[in-house]
Image (cartoon, helix red, strand yellow):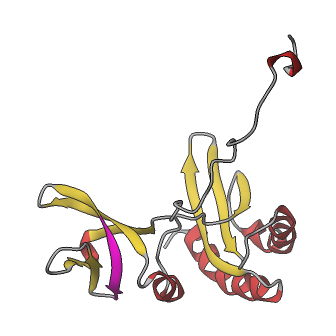
Amino acid sequence: MAKNDQALARLRPFCEATAAQMGLEFCDVLMEREPQGRYLRFYVDKDGGLSLDDCERFHRAVQPKAEAIDYDFMEVCSPGLDRPVRSERDIRKALGQRVSVHLYRPCEGSKLYEGTLVRMDEAEVVLDTGAETPLTFERKAVSLVRLVPDLSGLEDETEGIVIDSDELPGE
């Protein structure tokens, strides 16, 4: 295990305890390489949504403990509406929800499947796609399970807004 991996493993319990004290849900901490450098990303969430103040408070609390890790940038962010399903807690929340399953290799011509999560354990991921029988994938064949956000309830925020071109800047 690399030095950063060991440091991340030691940091997780602190992050979980800190998030719990702040009324947040600690989801994950990852080292992600991007062209600009190495990003140390902390993923936290909260019922009702995460605020910038929540992110800042968590950032300030964990930053001193993160000094043992070699990174270029540190971020605290939400896992998003389409969050990955990884932990036991994620699985419990995702049961009965619409998810996408990404495979390492194509199965019947596709690497991506979508359906309602029926079961996910160490051995299998089971989806109800509306077919007669549910689709079952070996867990080791699955690269990622991600929630599919339900955006059907959102209204068009621009509906009913009228802009007079005489009011536009620069005209």
Pick out the residue farthest to the left. 108
Q: Dominant secondary structure of the magenta stretch? A: strand
| Location of residue 86 with respect to 100 vertically, above or below | below
On the image, the x and y values in percent for residue 171 come to: 86, 10
- Nearest to the observer: residue 78 or residue 14: 78
**Which residue shows up at 46% across the image and 81% down it?**
94
User: Does the segment drawn in magenta span residue 159?
Assistant: no
**Which residue shows up at 46% across the image and 84% down it?**
91
**Which residue shows up at 34% across the image and 88% down it?**
121
- Nearest to the observer: residue 11 or residue 84: 84
Image quadrant where residue 68 sits: bottom right
**Which residue shows up at 32% across the image and 71% down it?**
115
Query: Viewed as shown, does residue 3 lie left or right of 113?
Result: right
Query: Viewed as shown, does residue 107 lie left or right of 158?
Result: left
On the image, the x and y values in percent for residue 139 come to: 28, 78
Query: Magenta residues?
Result: 114-121
